[in-house]
Image (tube, rainbow, N blue to C red):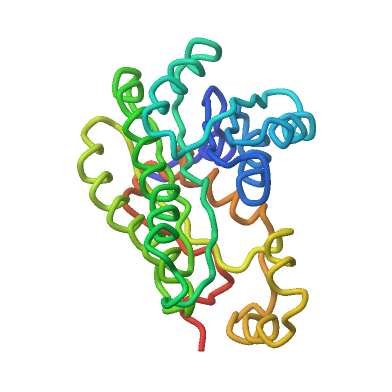
Amino acid sequence: MRETVDAAAAFSLSGQLALITGGGTGLGFGMAQAMLGAGARVVITGRRREILDEAVRALGEGAFAFEHDVTDAAGAGALVERIEQALGPISILVNNAGVHLKKPLAETSFEDFNRVLATHVGGAFAMTRAAVPSMKRHGGGSVVFIASMASFMGLPDLVAYSTAKSAYLGMVRSLATELAPDGIRVNGIAPGWIETPMLHQALDNDPGRWAKIISRTPQHRFGAPSDIGLAAVYLCSPAAGFVNGVVLPVDGGAVIGF
């Protein structure tokens, strides 16, 4: 007998509350837009109140902001508690907050290295550890880690960033197996080169690097923040109900290109 599929319902996030760290700009903002469009309510966090307030105004109804620095691991539980008291249980967590560091090994200090790991790895660990107990109590949820091409490719002068983003692969796989019995799916997204202000800041004065990136991307273009947002919607939706432990490249084919 042919199965009937309600595609609109399968990709809907109606009734969900999503927490996106670093959600005020760039990819985080793009994911917030997409999740709101799919019917979720969205909480964005970040360190700068003015950026958060501007983002909430732009996102519109259903968007909320809570100021938080992900390196404050001890404060992660209190943040989750404040959000849930105000808005209800969190069913989606997107670990997106991070910092970039481009330095060769000889110029990367131990303090630089630890700062990058504390933000990406420590921050994501603390937020996940804080959010999961409530997800368990309420019957499940979805956690997404925003990895990178640097999780898969050898990129020079990025030893700290590449180490942090590669750690997400292990976190996704380990947590996916541990939390699946509680109805919690854990996945990741590895964005390619996405057209954001940060990308333009890095490339506008470096035409050689710009051309190299385009030449090794089979689709010969940069992605848009909405590409990452829609991938996040999919991974958190019922449509991906049997998808667990995956790190999905959204990169125009760059990771397999030649």
The image quadrant of residue 242 is top left
Q: Position of residue 189 (x, y in %)?
A: 47, 56
Q: In the rendered image of this protein, does residue 192 appear above or below residue 25?
A: below
Q: Position of residue 124 (x, y in %)?
A: 40, 43
The image quadrant of residue 59 is top right
Residue drawn at 74 percent across, 32 percent down: 50
- State the residue in front, 7 or 4: 7
Residue drawn at 62 percent across, 81 percent down: 213
Q: In the rendered image of this protein, does residue 155 appear above or below residue 63?
A: below
Q: In the rendered image of this protein, does residue 66 appear above or below residue 111?
A: above
Q: In the rendered image of this protein, does residue 227 appear above or below residue 10?
A: below
Q: Is residue 164 left or right of residue 196?
A: left
For the N terminus, give its image quadrant.
top left
Q: Is residue 39 left or right of residue 3?
A: right
Residue drawn at 60 percent across, 80 percent down: 217
Report the label total.
Answer: 0
- State the residue in front, 127 or 8: 127
Q: Position of residue 149 (x, y in %)?
A: 48, 69
Q: Position of residue 257 (x, y in %)?
A: 51, 83
